[in-house]
Amino acid sequence: MDRIVIADDHPLFREALVSAVRKARPQAEIEECSSFAEADAALARASVDLLMLDLKLSDVEGMTGLNLVRTNHPAVPVAVVSASEEPHTVRRAMAVGAAGFIPKSSSLDTMVEAIGQILDGETWVPDVGEAEAEEADLQNRIASLTPSQLRILEGLKAGRLNKQIAYDLGVTEATIKAHLTSVFRKLGVQNRTQAVILSQQIDLM
């Protein structure tokens, strides 16, 4: 039986998502959450087959919640649900590691289709047009980073030194240096300055 967590602070939209899940997976166990803290607790209690995460919750906003889930629960597929349908928002969510992106304006049938595909291990995104080749390549490079490497890259963007990032993550400075080697290789850059310039083209948070 699938266990699905729905995190949205709007009761009416939670109800719509529950209806869509019931149609896609009638036997699913559904847990409703109105905040990110509640969702995080639900993820910690037992295995989850799908988290449906609103980008704007009372205690977290933007890509921060998605980043935290990808870091703390990397095996859990996340379907982002959002009132924002801009192509760059969809692409950012997918680059950070979402399994799908469901606009809140979607019809019930579209939501059912999206939920079913994601639970079947596929990705689902709305038709937002073709991205420029260079942008798509950057998204792929960012998406290739592990959650730890993403956090290190965010530290670089914030201007933090290796030892400060090591302290933030609770690891040694040598570990950070080793990770940076992989980060530079995956991004196709030679140093931290180039990495920061490249990463600024996508809002990781």
Image (spheres, rainbow, N blue to C red):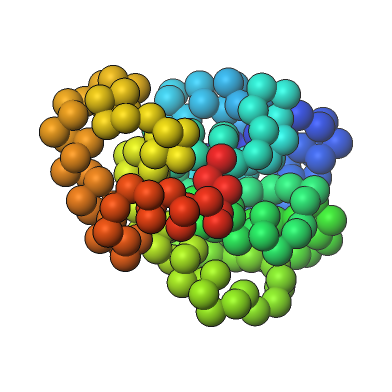
Give whichever of 111, 173 is nearer the camera: 173
Q: Residue at x 50, y 57 (%)?
A: 95
Number of residue marks:
0
Q: Residue at x 72, y 42 (%)?
A: 18
Q: Residue at x 27, y 59 (%)?
A: 190
Q: Residue at x 58, y 21 (%)?
A: 37
Q: Residue furthest front?
A: 193
Q: Is residue 196 visible?
A: yes
Give whichever of 111, 63 is nearer the camera: 63
Q: Is residue 154 visible?
A: no
Residue 5: percent from left, percent from top: 58, 36
Q: Is residue 58 above or below residue 95?
A: above
Q: Quadrant of residue 94?
A: bottom right
In the displayed structure image, the side of residue 202 where residue 126 appears, left or right: right
Give whichever of 145, 191 is nearer the camera: 191
Q: Quadrant of the C terminus?
A: top right
Residue 45: percent from left, percent from top: 44, 23
Residue 7: percent from left, percent from top: 65, 34
Q: Is residue 127 above or below residue 75?
A: below
In the displayed structure image, the side of residue 141 where residue 109 appears, left or right: right
In the displayed structure image, the side of residue 112 where residue 41 appears, left or right: left
Residue 192: percent from left, percent from top: 33, 48
